[in-house]
Image (cartoon, helix red, strand yellow):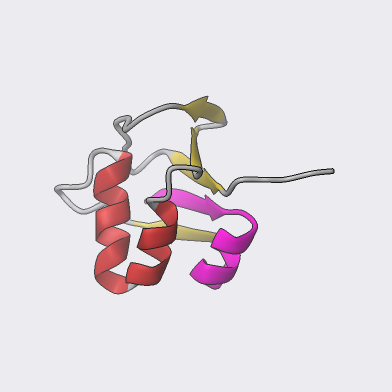
């Protein structure tokens, strides 16, 4: 099972900071995972699709739609602001 981590407002939408998710046979990229999440929770999936959300796979920031597997840890980072 893949370990999913949610931060900031994404954790609020997910209802938890972490969850374990079995990737479906078709979920091999981050976008596939988000689509699978959308089947259960479209509000969370819509937030994960925002351009400002960053993805971290196995503690490495990735760009774009990278391949993932059940052994991976995938973190979703919302935009941050400071001042």
Q: Say how many tags the image has.
A: 0
Q: Could you tell me residue 63's position as x and y percent?
A: 42, 27
Q: Which residues are magenta?
A: 1-16
Residue 27, image x and y in percent? 22, 46
Q: Is residue 74 above or below residue 23?
A: above
x then y, percent, for residue 61: 53, 28
Residue 40: give x, y in percent of width and height. Answer: 30, 72
Q: Nearer the viewer, residue 13 or 19?
A: 13
Q: Residue at x 42, y 65 (%)?
A: 44
Residue 59 in the image: above or below residue 42: above
Q: Compared with residue 72, is residue 16 higher up or lower down, i.e. above or below?
A: below
Q: Is residue 36 magenta?
A: no
Give yes or no for residue 6 being in the magenta stretch: yes
Left or right: 65 as drawn, with respect to 5: left
Of residues 9 and 83, the one drawn nearer to the viewer in this rendering: 83
Furthest-front residue in view?
A: 83
The answer to which of 1 and 33 lies nearer the viewer is: 33
* Picture residue at 47% right of the left edge, 50% below the top: 3
The residue drawn where x is 65% and y is 57% is: 8
Question: Which residue occupies 49% across, 61% down?
Answer: 19
Q: Residue furthest right?
A: 83
Quarter of the image that includes the C terminus: top right
Residue 17 picture quarter: bottom right
Q: Residue 24, located in which quarter of the rendered image? A: bottom left
């Amino acid at each position: 099972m893949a370990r999913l981590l949610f931060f900031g407002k994404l954790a609020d939408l997910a209802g938890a900071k972490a969850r374990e998710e079995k990737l479906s046979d078709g979920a091999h990229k981050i976008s596939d995972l988000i689509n699978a999440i959308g089947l259960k929770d479209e509000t969370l999936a819509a937030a994960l699709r925002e351009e400002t959300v960053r993805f971290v796979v196995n503690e490495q920031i990735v760009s774009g739609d990278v391949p993932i597997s059940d052994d991976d840890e995938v973190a979703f980072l919302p935009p941050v602001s400071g001042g």
